[in-house]
């Protein structure tokens, strides 16, 4: 997560002023898309986390996973 925040800060810091809020949102979206392509490692302990979320949130978690 810290790496992702660093990438966002790096892109917005080099750009002084944005022409509009929409321009900033578009830029952040593109950074997120480029960053997500690089994420290749599986999430550590995901099965345990998913089990705990299922206990806490029940059907809401299961319905989101089917999408």
Image: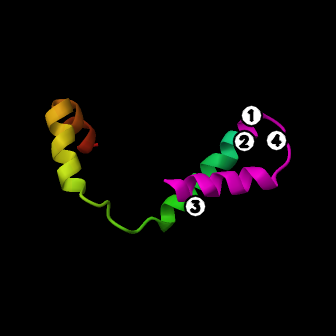
Give the residue at x 25% y 44%: 65
Give the residue at x 49% y 53%: 1
Q: Is 27 on the left-hand or right-hand side of 45?
A: right
Question: What is the number of the mark on residue 24?
Answer: 2
Q: Is residue 3 magenta?
A: yes
Under circle 1, the secondary element is: helix
Label 4 close to label 1 by CB (< 8 Å): yes
Question: Circle 4: is it few (<14), some (14-19), or many (20+) Cα within 10 Å?
Answer: few
**Of the pair 15 and 6, the residue shown nearer to us:** 6
Circle 1 is placed at which residue position? Answer: 21
Question: Circle 2: is it few (<14), some (14-19), or many (20+) Cα within 10 Å?
Answer: some
Q: Pinpoint residue 40: horizontal percent, then vertical percent.
A: 40, 68
Q: Pinpoint residue 55: horizontal percent, then vertical percent.
A: 14, 35
Q: Is residue 17 magenta?
A: yes
Label 4 close to label 2 by CB (< 8 Å): yes
Circle 4 is placed at which residue position? Answer: 18
> In the picture, residue 18 is in which quadrant?
top right
Mark 4–mark 2 Cα distance, whole angstroms, equals 6 Å
Mark 1–mark 2 Cα distance, whole angstroms, equals 5 Å
Q: Pinpoint residue 43: horizontal percent, then vertical percent.
A: 32, 60
Label 3 close to label 1 by CB (< 8 Å): no
């Amino acid at each position: 997560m810290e790496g992702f925040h660093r990438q966002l800060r790096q892109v917005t810091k080099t750009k002084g002023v944005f022409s509009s809020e929409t321009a900033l949102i578009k830029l952040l979206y593109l950074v997120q898309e480029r960053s997500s392509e690089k994420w290749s490692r599986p999430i550590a302990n995901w099965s345990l986390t998913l089990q705990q979320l299922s206990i806490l949130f029940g059907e809401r978690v299961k319905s989101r996973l089917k999408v």
